[in-house]
Image: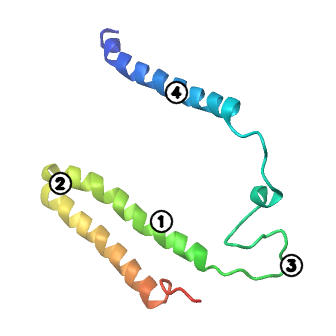
């Protein structure tokens, strides 16, 4: 247990974080607004359409979901680029080649989505 002193800072940071989160939640409960708001504000909402008022066989556009999936695709690219850039000196050429292969797959996906018109927004 000689190395347990190394974890004291981590424990203190964890306790401060949990305490601060609890304190903020308590303040919100005590000082926050007590009214629930109107029925329109607490109702379900999706892209300007209340799904509970639609007939059962109404078809909704999938453009919103397609755009969200494309956003996730390119967001994943950014998530992988930062750690790669941090360790680039140590991984050298193999890492550079692998990242270019990864980027090539993403660029092909982007070109495919663009060619299929997934990035066009209809009015």
Name the residue carrying label 1: 72
Q: How many numbered circles are shown?
A: 4
Q: Quadrant of the N terminus?
A: top left
Name the residue carrying label 2: 88
State whether residue 4 is above or below residue 123. above
What residue is at 25 percent from the left and 55 percent from the top? 84
Q: CA distance from mark 4 to mark 3?
A: 46 Å
Instruction: Point out residue 85 in the picture as x, y percentages from the top left corner.
Output: 22, 55
Name the residue carrying label 3: 55
Q: CA distance from mark 1 to mark 2?
A: 24 Å
Label 1 neighbour load within 10 Å: few <14, some 14-19, many 20+: few
| Helix, strand or loop for disc 4 | helix
Tell me which numbered mark, 4 or 3, is placed earlier along the sequence: 4
Instruction: Point out residue 26 in the picture as x, y percentages from the top left corner.
Output: 64, 28
In the image, 71 versus 49, the foreground residue is 49
Q: Left of 43 or right of it: where is 12? A: left
């Amino acid at each position: 247990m000689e190395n347990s002193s190394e974890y004291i800072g981590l424990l203190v940071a964890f306790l401060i974080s949990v305490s601060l989160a609890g304190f903020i939640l308590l303040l919100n409960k005590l000082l926050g607004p007590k009214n629930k708001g109107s029925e329109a504000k607490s109702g379900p909402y999706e892209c300007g359409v209340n799904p509970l008022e639609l007939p059962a066989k109404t078809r909704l556009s999938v453009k919103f979901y397609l755009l969200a999936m494309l956003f996730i695709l390119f967001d994943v690219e950014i998530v992988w680029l930062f750690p790669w850039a941090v360790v680039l000196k140590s991984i050298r050429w193999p890492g550079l080649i692998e990242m270019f292969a990864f980027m090539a797959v993403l660029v092909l996906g982007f070109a495919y989505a663009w060619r299929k018109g997934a990035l066009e927004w209809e009015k």
